[in-house]
Amino acid sequence: MSTTKAYAAPAANIPLEPFSLERRAPGAHDVQIEILFCGVCHSDLHQIRDEWGGSIFPMVPGHEIVGRVTAVGDHVSKFKVGDLAGVGCMVDSCRECTSCQEGLEQYCETTGFVGTYNGRENGTGQPTYGGYSQQIVVDEKYTLKVSDKLDLARVAPLLCAGITTYSPLREWKVGPGHRVAVMGLGGLGHMAVKFAAALGAEVTVLSTSPSKEADAKALGAHKFIVTKEKEQMDSVNNYFDFIINTISAQVDMAAYVNLLRREGTMILLGVPTEAPQLHAFNLIAKRRRVAGSLIGGIAETQEMLDFCAEHNIMSDIEVIKIEDINEAYERMLKGDVKYRFVIDTASLN
């Protein structure tokens, strides 16, 4: 066991504060990682406020982790001391069900995946603590290789925001000739734009904020629609093959679904606290679909990281010190970040 400095939420809706936790000693298949950077995900905010229910306190958030390997177990074969490594949203699953066997551990049908934080370890039942900390110990099966070609701070959000947007684009085989709309230009949305453009699709950003047009096009978008302008929305009715919905607030779903062509698909990534409302007619009239997608499996996440290294794709970020995390949350609620906060964990020392 080793004592690790961290920041934790002691209870729901209480500001994060310094916290000390014990990390297990590396087992035979474990990798010990000194955390260098950790992204701040909007789901961290949902969890510390217990907006989805089931939050475990004290909670150390953080599932966008990049660091350097400091120790490995005797049976570890993929990593050695000194390697760069990443940890995303999960640190275990049952490993035996159909989903796990197919590399879709995020859909584990037995235990469900074990979250990097706010979960419970298989076997011990101990709570998992995330990346707002100095180090972490993870089974090598759930540890990812990180290229030294990329800026590590900008890599961190790829472990959630990146894979969350990459996975549905790959699942639906998005590429040249497809028209893709991205709803929202935040942490998820800006990555969806980058990936869809890199895959060769025509990309349109749908936003309520006219001021974001220049940024959207700089990120790779070909078109920009101000959703509050009826004439602009009407111009793209029945237009898109795919809509990537990254918005976690309530919206008029019908207005967006109507932008889909016949047999088009909207993929939900954001999780509003209330159920979305949609009349069946908006779907059946043109055989449209609404689907969901949850992060990605370990193999696909590694594929995404390799794709990013090949195409020089990284998140646009603002680096903060850990003591500024509560202020960062307040700014997130106001949409005051381009486009992801990343904690420099050296500030924990």
Image: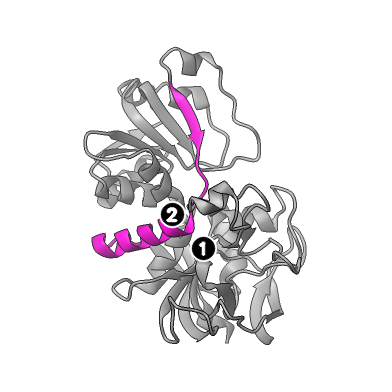
Q: Residue at x 38, y 26 (%)?
A: 264
Q: Which residues are magenta?
A: 288-315
Q: Residues within 10 Å of mark 1 (few under 14, many from 20)?
A: many
Q: From the viewer's perspective, is residue 305 above or below residue 175?
A: below
Q: From the viewer's perspective, is residue 289 above or below residue 285?
A: below
Residue type, mark 2 in image:
Ile
Residue 122 position, x and y percent, is 70, 64
| Left or right placement of residue 230 versus residue 56 in this view | left
- Distance Cα–Cα, label 2 vs label 1: 9 Å
Q: Secondary structure at mark 1?
A: loop
Tell whether label 1 touches label 2 (CB within 8 Å). yes
Q: Is residue 182 visible?
A: yes
Q: Residues within 10 Å of mark 2 (few under 14, many from 20)?
A: many
Q: Which mark is residue 163?
A: 2
Q: Residue at x 58, y 77 (%)?
A: 136
Q: Is residue 290 magenta?
A: yes
Q: Secondary structure at mark 2?
A: helix
Residue type, mark 1 in image:
Gly
On-image quarter of the N terminus: bottom right
| Left or right placement of residue 187 versus residue 226 in this view | right
Residue 342 position, x and y percent, is 48, 68
Q: Is residue 339 visible?
A: no
Along the line of sight, the residue nearer the viewer: 112 or 164 = 112
| Residue tagged 1 | 88
Along the line of sight, the residue nearer the viewer: 286 or 42 = 286
Q: Quadrant of residue 148?
A: bottom left
What colour-coding does the image apply?
one colour
Disc nearer the start of the sequence (2/1):
1
